[in-house]
Amino acid sequence: MPSPDSAHSIQARSRQKLWLAFAAVFLIWGSTYLAIRYAVQTIPPYFMVGTRFLVSGVILFLWARWRGAPNPTQREWRDGGIVGLLLLCGGNGAVAWAEQRVPSGITALLVASVPLWIVVIDWLRPHGRKPHLTVAIGLVVGLAGVGVLALPGAMTANGVVEAAGAVMLLFGSISWAAGSIYSRHGARPQSAEMATALQMILGSVALLLVAGVAGEFAQFRPSAVSLPSFLGWAYLVTFGGLVGFTAYIYLLGATTPAKATTYAYVNPVVAVFLGWAIAGEPIVPRTILAATIILIGVAMITIAGGRDSASGREGPRENESLRGNA
């Protein structure tokens, strides 16, 4: 039986590990939006995202197999492909494309609307679940914040948010929400690492197909890739995909899902701050107002969903194996 001092030391190390994991998820995932902005400066967007997830996915697949995860079944590959198509090709691909036109901080705030779209899609789908009052109010509040941010007149470094970029981000958020809902019901490996690896590998195939159709292979010139773009890509592969994901998986096992998913409130704030501090993206009153409204709406939905889960009812949640810009 461990001594009191030994038990106290183990508890202190466990707390330290927990705080380090939270710091990794908050800071690393919040910084991926800025990394994407730099990566797409000289690397075509779908090619950039496709290659980053292909590398991360293969590494995770080999890691999961080395740890004893069984080979996925044919159905798990199929459903993993559908989820990867919606999350990565539809969601992350849209983010990478839009960040050529929209500041990284604004992008993060629009992507923070994903829980709102999850509620909408879950309500409108066949045999869907009607949101209760708190969730419905949170939905209205959050969508109002999206409107404040995305409607004509929102200020950026160039004067306004480009309509094409805002529309693409809304499309990507809806695609991510649809993939999150499908992932609840589709077949998936028990190993979280293997489930994510399937989504990354098959999602990267779809992304690279889009890149090929869009002519991005012909546009890509290794000699033209700038150092900031390469470092952004490498950061997304290693820290964004592997370190951040590992920290999140640890949090899911070490704390409650409600606490683990608090990144949804912190990441946009980190992204806006880093965009301002490093890339010189302006923070105007309209951005602050929209951020406050969106995050209040997301908080209402998430807290209500957590209470539903605690009482035995399934509340709205995001895909548990992969998040927005890991």
Image: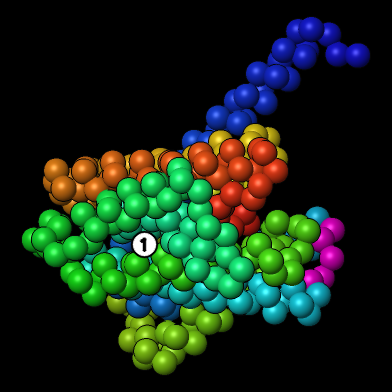
> Quadrant location of residue 66?
bottom right
Majority secondary structure of magenta residues = loop
Region in magenta? 68-72
Q: Secondary structure at mark 1?
A: helix
**Residue situated in front as seen by the camera: 199 or 211:** 199
Residue furthest to the left in view is 159
Residue at x 60% of width, y 31% of height: 18
Relative to 110, is 283 on the left or the right? left
**Residue situated in front as seen by the camera: 310 or 211:** 310
Residue 106 rendering spot, x and y as whole percentages: 26, 55
Residue at x 53% of width, y 58% of height: 130
The residue identified by callout 1 is: 36
Residue 318 rendering spot, x and y as whole percentages: 55, 55
Relative to 306, is 97 on the left or the right? left
Residue 207 rendering spot, x and y as whole percentages: 48, 79
Residue furthest to the top in view is 4
Density class for disc 1 (Cα within 10 Å; few <14, some 14-19, many ≥20) is many
Q: Is residue 189 visible?
A: yes
**Residue situated in front as seen by the camera: 88 or 82:** 82
Q: Quadrant of the N terminus?
A: top right
Q: Does residue 298 sit above or below 11 in this rendering?
A: below
Q: Is residue 242 visible?
A: no
Q: Does residue 104 sit above or below 225 in this rendering?
A: above
Q: Amino acid at mark 1?
A: Ile
Q: Is residue 69 magenta?
A: yes
**Residue situated in front as seen by the camera: 105 or 296:** 296
Residue 215 rendering spot, x and y as whole percentages: 36, 91
Residue at x 67% of width, y 39% of height: 311
Relative to 105, is 151 on the left or the right? left
Q: Is residue 179 magenta?
A: no
> Quadrant location of residue 181?
bottom right
Relative to 249, is 69 on the left or the right? right
